[in-house]
Image (cartoon, grey):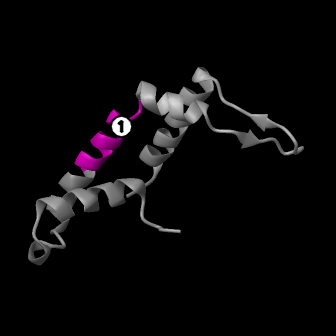
Amino acid sequence: MNQHSMIERVATAIETIMFSPHELPLDDELHGKYLITARAAIAAMREPSDAIVNKIQTLRMPLPSGGSYLTPGRDGAVWLWQAIIDAALEEKP
């Protein structure tokens, strides 16, 4: 599994698009600004779109006892999405 935080990965992806390969890696000060940008981009995703909620609601999560599945409702889908985004925001870059 990739050990870089989600914030670090998003910042690096933005930098890769914004700069030519010969300009990378960026100095620490400029990279720090892209970490701030990445955090803001991830935070903006905290409220899921209807399409995301609808997709999550179609997930069938197996119950530990087996044989049955749990399907999250709208509230469960929103909670799950926000928990994932919150976890990404809590990671240290």
Please report the residue visible at 47 percent of the width from the left and 68 percent of the height from the top: 2
Query: Residue 92 location in percent, x, y?
Result: 42, 55
Q: Is residue 35 left or right of residue 70?
A: left
**Which residues are the magenta region?**
36-46
**In the rendered image, the vertical position of residue 55 relative to residue 26, given as above or below:** above
Please report the residue visible at 15 percent of the width from the left and 69 percent of the height from the top: 27
Please report the residue visible at 69 percent of the width from the left and 39 percent of the height from the top: 60
Provide the residue designation for mark 1: 43
Determine the secondary structure under disc 1: helix
Q: Nearer the viewer, residue 64 or 90?
A: 64
Q: Is residue 19 left or right of residue 39?
A: left
**In the rendered image, the vertical position of residue 84 relative to residue 35, given as above or below:** above
Q: Quadrant of the C terminus?
A: bottom left
Q: Is residue 80 magenta?
A: no
Please report the residue visible at 25 percent of the width from the left and 48 percent of the height from the top: 36
Query: Residue 65 location in percent, x, y?
Result: 90, 43
Query: Residue 35 location in percent, x, y?
Result: 27, 53
**In the rendered image, the vertical position of residue 67 relative to residue 13, given as above or below:** above
Residue projecting furthest to the bottom: 22
Instruction: Say which quarter of the image contains residue 89.
Output: top left
Q: Nearer the viewer, residue 80 or 8?
A: 80
Q: Is residue 18 left or right of residue 83?
A: left
